Amino acid sequence: MEIDAFKLKKLRNYLNDEIGIYVEDNKLRNIYERKIIKLLERFDYNDFNKFFKDLILKKNSILKQEFINVFTVNETYFFREKHQFDTLIKYVLPTLDKIRPRNEVISILCAPVSTGEELYSIAILLIEEGNLIKKRDFLLLGIDIDSNVIKKAKEGIYSARSVHKLPPELIKKYFVEEKGNYRIKDFLKKVVNFKVINILDKYAMKKLGVFDVIFSRNMLIYFDEKSKRETLAIFYSILKDEGYLFLGHAERIPSDVKLFESLKIGESFVYKKNSNSK
Ligand SMILES: C[S@@+](CC[C@H](N)C(=O)[O-])C[C@H]1O[C@@H](n2cnc3c(N)ncnc32)[C@H](O)[C@@H]1O
């Protein structure tokens, strides 16, 4: 089977409208054509038009989810860009702790969380820091569009590569070694939550509530400009006043978007909600 360029572009545009990811022409042919053909075969389609019609009419929600899972890039690991977690723990959370009412929960959203390492890294560092969690409750939520990665995040079983940046004493404290893999201990699993959500679905996002901190690293680089701006507006709407946004090291907010103020804290760039904007 072969899929012609026109059809591949139709799929690319549909994906882009639905979830923001934009795939360039050369990657469509070189990387994704083969994967889409496999998907068609798995779902017993030998007619592309029938497949596309079922996809866009959302006749089969499993088909749509599996189609999306084909295009996501899920690379992540514990303590990736550790300096950003240090900025969170040493500067951002103590600052929020001073200004938020004593009985208020501080909420942190990882959007996207992929297989969970980022959110578990935050949980580990919060426990290690000790003082903040003695004073108040925290809510830690991770979301991702890819159902496979959310399943893995909930299972909490990681390869040696995934934990390679963690010091051995933290591995010992928070993981059980099992057949060359590392399983998150139950007490740590209990403090995090994971959900499958499309970040561009503003109704689903608003239903999550409001957050003090949003980590959104290494997703916007795959988005087109329009989806990136839409996502930033959604983040703005679900961040509390004085809330903070962390992006990946290769990601920046366009200079004409005035929703956030950029701060440099140590090695990290952090964005603070500009409460008078919009
Ligand atoms: C490279 S991973 C980043 C993981 C982690 N934040 C990190 O930096 O290590 C990018 C993730 O973005 C997710 N993603 C892409 N588009 C999305 C969307 N519209 N809504 C939610 N997640 C999305 C993908 O499924 C993928 O798991």
Image (cartoon, rainbow, N blue to C red):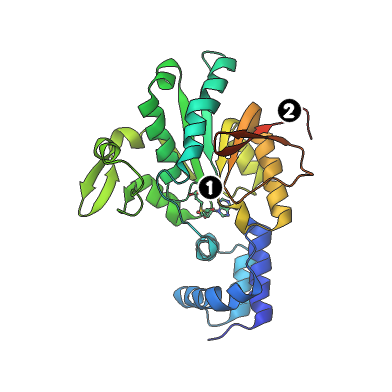
Between the residue at mark 2 and the residue at mark 1, the CA separation in whole angstroms equals 24 Å
For label 1, the residue is 112
- Name the amino acid type tagged 1: Pro
17 or 204: nearer the eye?
A: 17
Q: Residues within 10 Å of mark 2 (few under 14, many from 20)?
A: some
Residue contact at pointers 2 and 1, CB within 8 angstroms: no
Mark 1 CB in 8 Å range of ligand 1?
yes
Say what secondary structure mark 2 lies in.
Answer: loop
Can the viewer see residue 52 in this picture? yes
Number of numbered markers: 2
In the figure, residue 192 lies in which quadrant? top left
Image coordinates of residue 54 in percent, x first then y, are 60, 69
Q: Residues within 10 Å of mark 1 (few under 14, many from 20)?
A: many
Residue at 51%, 32% in the rendered image: 87
Residue at 50%, 78% in the rendered image: 34
Image coordinates of residue 179 in percent, x first then y, are 20, 54
For label 2, the residue is 275
Q: Is residue 156 left or right of residue 67?
A: left
